[in-house]
Image (tube, coloured by chain):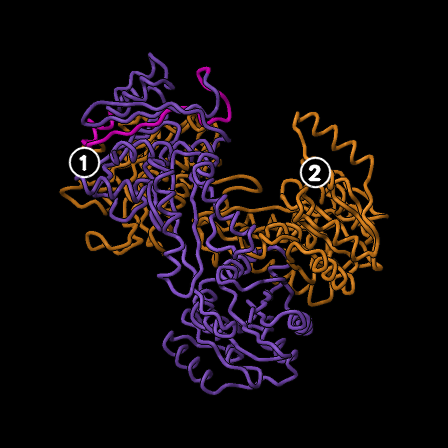
Chain colours: A purple, B orange
Amino acid sequence: MPVRAELLAVGDELLYGDILNGNAAQLGRQLADVGITVTHSGVVGDDIETIAEALRAALGRADAVLLTGGLGPTQDDLTREGLARAAGVELVRDEFLESQLRHRFRDLRRNVPDMNYRQANLPAGAEPLPNERGTAPGIKLELLGGIAYALPGPPHEMQPMFASSVLPDLLRRAGEPAVVVHRVLHTSGMWESAVAEAMAPEVQRLAAQVAAGQDRNPTIAFLASGGQTRVRISARAANRTEAYKLIEPIEAFGREALGEGLYGIDDETLEGVVHGLLLERGETVAVAESLTGGLLAARLSETPGASETFRGGIVAYQAELKDQLLGANAVARGAVTEETAQRMAAGARERLGATWGLATTGVAGPTESEGHPVGTLYLGLAGPDGTQTRHVQLPGDRPMVRMLSVVQALDLLRRTIQR
Amino acid sequence: MPVRAELLAVGDELLYGDILNGNAAQLGRQLADVGITVTHSGVVGDDIETIAEALRAALGRADAVLLTGGLGPTQDDLTREGLARAAGVELVRDEFLESQLRHRFRDLRRNVPDMNYRQANLPAGAEPLPNERGTAPGIKLELLGGIAYALPGPPHEMQPMFASSVLPDLLRRAGEPAVVVHRVLHTSGMWESAVAEAMAPEVQRLAAQVAAGQDRNPTIAFLASGGQTRVRISARAANRTEAYKLIEPIEAFGREALGEGLYGIDDETLEGVVHGLLLERGETVAVAESLTGGLLAARLSETPGASETFRGGIVAYQAELKDQLLGANAVARGAVTEETAQRMAAGARERLGATWGLATTGVAGPTESEGHPVGTLYLGLAGPDGTQTRHVQLPGDRPMVRMLSVVQALDLLRRTIQR
């Protein structure tokens, strides 16, 4: 039996736009992944009758409603009351929940106002859902011929409760055991259009299957952010093994088609992969930065344990410092040249005692410099076998040029040591 | 007459959680600012009857509905059809809009499929709203005793259309001419609770006014992000002068109460203020970084024109480099000490030839180091009159400790040169 679900978020702060309804996006994605259709998603304010009315409308259309928010201890947390009103039942103090709260507050050595025990109230007939990360239990209640699950608003409390208590229950009701697995292929140094073109034959194959009436399963999505493009392959099946079988041929195709552009899968990051490759080879890197102004060093030091492979860096923002600290000869020859990038890379390698020296120089904007347009980037990479350079013209404004420059620099190093 | 408004976003991609409903937050905030109450916000998928049904429900409760999305040229853009269905009218091709589209596509030299002219269809009796940033016109339609405005989904098209066509019309209907102005007070080096405590008397004064039955106007909000706390004062009045008169006493109170914690107002940034102060004094800064790994330099080079006051920096991630590049004596005396922070600051100042040398050393995590817990931060600041240090214990994980360390460092420099 297909389950139709609706989402209902409760909170004035959502209506006023003080916070974004990220819970709806999270839940929508995860429900879509298991084939549960979400047809409406709503937001209402902190008012008992409005909540109850929205619940009645939702359960008139759908089988299940997932509420988020309004379970806290203060007077404006009214989801419990709204549920009870819609179900036509009373709120009842749950003694077990109350004693749990009492223990919890005692452990925290906090003097807790009586009001907080409102969190132990449940609509008659409801079942509490355990909250591993906070004090407000969730609520599961059958009403109006359907089912409602009320989850806390903070995403770090909502998410585990959804995964452990709500999703399994919904899948049981749907009668279709289903798991969804994803595989993410990470690329760098390829524009989104090039990634899409490389994957096009598989995208077309799946589209033809859908056109022929088959399920939209597996699926391929392209996600571009931070100057990198990810390919997400998702598949749904009765168990993980079956689901991965659907993913495998697409992944194999992608590994071949993306070639050197592919740097990692799933949770891997570009800086993490560079760190891992250097560690494997017993090598280190040092940087010399101009237009990236420290962002490249910051990225290389992001990974825990980075000090094993990252020596450090020199941010030489003014031409004269490029000469003095790195021997770049930039004052005489211009800061934005291939030669300066090379000398900066060699200077960083020697003076910081690293296997590799990686350098950035160029024009971040907002205005051109030395006759070079905004977005001009020269990279230098010095290594045991000499130096190489890369020249790229990047799109975007100052923050985007700086961010893309960092990705280009890491990509140059990665491709060189991965070969 | 108070206007009650509802929001209705159209698009499967919102239900599936592929994108966040940022339009709802934007519109909610701006409507709340002018005193228009939003009581429901909904999302529905790309289906004519679902859109029509949601419109009927919304106009049964409210006076106005603002729709976003579903106005594009493809078959799954169905907001026009949904509006026509709810109003019980036909879609009619608008010849003026069609000729506009024809000119527009000709200018772009694009061969445009006939399908794109769907964007010239309007429900009978509707009025088009001009779109300055895209091809899809908006729609204004009186139906079911209320009014509906349909706006394009892309925020950069939606926002100007809302500001120029929808908001003035809504305010006319409300019969209350109103402008809303904001003043933002930026603080650094103060925890959110300290900022809230400083402003408490004014918050209480306004709360007492509301309790006595007055409008919630002006308002004070505390916004914490990026390790800094902002105080936003908002006021509504018939014109800007009147509105600023409401803000002035609160702003004056805040300037006094926040003291040195206040670094700027409205669009000012911490790094921009530091840059401006240095520029005024004809001074420069150079940095020496350990746990921040380049983030401090990146922040100081974010402001356009930063090269006038920012000399550059040295990221000495390994103790031996702190000694070699900065003369820090860290190998012998420990990297995480007050003395090392001082020596790093002095080293940066001398070797990079700056008025000020600013240094960070500490433990970003994930594990403790040299017996110091995660979150330990030592700052050093060397200047014309000697060096000073600051020791702080910061909360959070590795990325948060690094980010907060940058703010603490900038705050130390700012307070010193602002005195």
Indicate the chain on which mark 2 is placed: B
In front here: B177 or B189?
Answer: B177
User: Which of the numbered marks, if any, corresponds to residue B323?
Assistant: 1
Mark 1 closeness class: few <14, some 14–19, many ≥20 residues within 10 Å: many
Residue A112 placement (x, y as % from top left): 46, 77
Residue in the image at 67% along x and 36% along y? B134
The magenta stretch spans which residues?
A: A347-371
Q: Are marks 1 and 2 on the same chain?
A: yes
Picture mark count? 2
Residue A213 part of the magenta segment = no
* Residue drawn at the location 72% of the way across and 67% of the way down: B212
Query: Residue visible at 24% across and 47% down?
Result: A305
* Residue B240 falls left or right of residue A193: right
Q: Is residue B19 left or right of residue B302?
A: right
The answer to whether residue A361 is magenta is yes
Q: Is residue A328 left or right of residue A9?
A: left
Q: Is residue B282 above or below residue A302?
A: above
Q: Nearer the viewer, residue B393 or B104?
A: B104
Residue type marked 1: Asp
- Position of the C terminus of chain A by quadrant: top left
Which one is nearer the viewer's eye here, A346 or A64? A64
Relative to A346, residue A22 above or below: below
Q: Which residue is mark 2?
A: B116
Asked whether residue B366 is in view, the answer is yes
Specify the amino acid type for callout 2: Asn
- Give the mark, 1 or 2, whose residue is nearer the N terminus: 2
Residue B37 screen position, x and y as percent: 72, 59
Farthest residue to the top: give it. A332
Residue B87 screen position, x and y as percent: 82, 56
Label 1 residue SS: helix
The chain containing the residue under callout 1 comes to: B
